[in-house]
Amino acid sequence: MNDFNITSGGSIDENLDGDLTPTEPWTWKNAGSKIIGFVSSSVIPMIPGLIAGGMLKVVLLLIVTFIDSNFATSSSYLLLSAIADAPFYFMPIFVAYGAANKLGATPIYAMASAATLLHGSFIGLVTAGDPITLFGISVRLLSYGTSLLPALLIAILAYYVEKFLNKIIPNIFKGIFVGMGTIFVAGSLGFIILGPLGNMIGQGIASLFMFLEGTVGPIAVGFLAAALPWMVMTGMHTALAPFMTQLLTNPGYDAMIRPGFLLHNMAEGGAVIGVTARTKDKAKRGEFLSIAIGCIVAGVKGKTVIKLPTICL
């Protein structure tokens, strides 16, 4: 993509190669951490939106349960439910945005390519259930709303396609053909290969966590809660965000990661409350109490993890 200088009529090429930013080379030793870091960086920007939608769902549920059960049949409820569901249903677009930003690509190309999986025409074909093809190649009838990995793979492909096209297309034609070529290739392969592949990987991850839940569920949650203080101190807890998001997509609930975070927050907040009750320093008592409330109520655990050892001393 180019920004055109109207005064001179020239164009300025965007640097998609990342030459000015030194990066650590890929090795077998750091491949895992790099992949997890990339996925986490792609997912984390959309988490506030998921929290916002989830909280609105809770408010609507409380209204229907305790105030007016007939509200569930009103148009206001349906429209508010659509607002609450939007961050989840359009998750592929948000994931593509985060991935493109992390890669240094043009976000709109990745977002447009991922959005094709949610287009009404494709949804209609999936609902009809009749076999469909693209260029004579069979396309699987899958629903990609709330999905994570298909959009992530599409965003990666869009980055490399855009990078390649910027190298081979003359400057004068880049504004016309780079974007078109990027969404054409990434969108088409999203239907044929990347969408089904991401769906398959996501189902595998969900099956693994469901297996752990069914066999050693409570023990696994306990171990996760115990490990979280060290994970938070090193920033490793962010690596769990993609798996949590995938579980919310398939099977639709998270019985391991979020309960582990909840236990961790309650335990650390309770420890700080205990110290608050024993300390005689009024200034510290107020500070400790605010830290405990932030950890238990809002899940702000970073300060608790850092301050807890010194608090206990």
Image: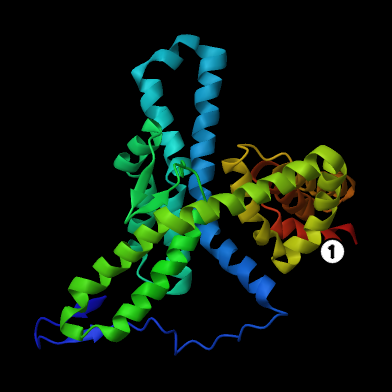
Residue carrying label 1? 310
Give me the residue at 49% from left, 24% from top: 60
Horizontal and vertical percent position of residue 69: 50, 11
Q: In which quarter of the image is residue 51?
A: top right
Classify the position of the C terminus by image quarter: bottom right
Type of amino acid at the residue the image marks with label 1: Thr
As drawn, is 26 to the left or to the right of 270? Answer: left
As drawn, is 174 to the left or to the right of 254? Answer: left
- Is residue 42 shown to the viewer in this render? yes
Give me the residue at 45% from left, 46% from top: 140
Q: In which quarter of the image is residue 178?
A: bottom left
Q: In this view, does 31 lie above or below 276?
A: below
Q: In this view, does 5 lie above or below 142?
A: below
- Is residue 266 shown to the viewer in this render? no
| Crowd tier of the residue under label 1, counting other residues whose Cα lies within 10 Å: few below 14, some 14–19, many 20 or above | few
For the residue pair 189 and 313, the one nearer the viewer reads as 189
For the residue pair 246 and 292, the one nearer the viewer reads as 246
Q: Is residue 200 above or below residue 88?
A: below
For the residue pair 83 and 310, the one nearer the viewer reads as 83
Horizontal and vertical percent position of residue 307: 78, 61
| Number of marks drawn | 1
As drawn, is 126 to the left or to the right of 234? Answer: left
Q: Is mark 1 on a helix, strand or loop?
A: helix
Q: In this view, does 103 lie above or below 310?
A: below
